[in-house]
Amino acid sequence: MGIDRLSLSGNKKIKFWKLLGTGKGETFTPKDADIQRWGLLITIPESELASFDSSKLVKRWHQKSLKRYQVVLKNISVQGKWSKAEPFKSDLFDPPWNGKIVALTRARIKWLKNPIFWRSVPPVTVSLKSAAGLISAIGIGEAPLGLQGTFSIWESSAAVRAFAYQGEAHKAAIAATARERWYSEELFARFAVISESGSL
């Protein structure tokens, strides 16, 4: 993955990219890390996607992989920044999108706030696993500590909203975030699932 950073940085068609470690989706804590699975997030013009898919870089990944999951997304809404950038441009859907949704969260946690942050995670994890409309969810991160996020797939926008704003555990976490100010940077985005292949 470290070597691949050079190839990604040199591709001028890619507007934003992040190589990501992942978790198993069991506890959403550092001990949940899955060293056999990793991800790549890129923003790229749709017209360039096929070319990237057939690149030497992606072909090399295929040769080394046991499984692959790929999802093409269009952004519905985004709040916040990622590495001081605004990587996602919202697309207009007319009529409004009513298919599958990907919710992406990402945060830079203040170092001294890590202990209290991780103590708040278990109740939200329990709530997430039982949330109506959740299809799948895993943890993602740019580093084992401090740069954390989630990638989740939902049946609909309504299901995401219900979990985010009606579930007691998540509402408590939102209140704690405002109170403790444990993030130095955060981002929350929702995407329409345009196409997907493989299994997560």
Image (cartoon, rainbow, N blue to C red):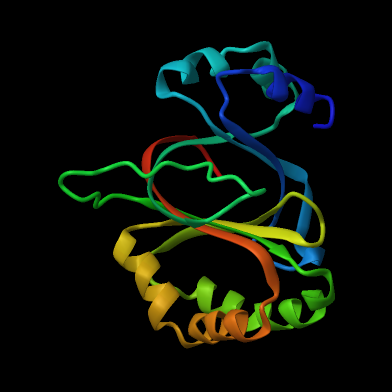
Which residue is at 61% across, 79% downward? 177
Residue 72's spot in the image, x, y percent?
44, 35
Which residue is at 26% across, 43% downward? 92
Front residue of this view, candidates 125 and 178: 178
Q: 129 above or below 9?
A: below
Q: Is residue 11 left or right of residue 15?
A: right
Q: Is residue 11 left or right of residue 90?
A: right
Residue 78's spot in the image, x, y percent?
44, 54
- Can residue 27 be seen? no
Which of the 4 image quarters holds residue 182? Answer: bottom right
Q: Is residue 145 left or right of residue 139?
A: right
Q: 176 above or below 194?
A: below
Front residue of this view, candidates 143 and 194: 143
Which residue is at 78% across, 77% downward? 113
Residue 63's spot in the image, x, y percent?
72, 20
- Can residue 81 be seen? yes
Quadrant (top left, top right, bottom left, bottom right) of the N terminus: top right
Residue 127's spot in the image, x, y percent?
52, 79
Q: How many marks?
A: 0
Q: 93 above or below 13?
A: below
Quadrant (top left, top right, bottom left, bottom right) of the C terminus: top right
Residue extending farthest to the front is 84
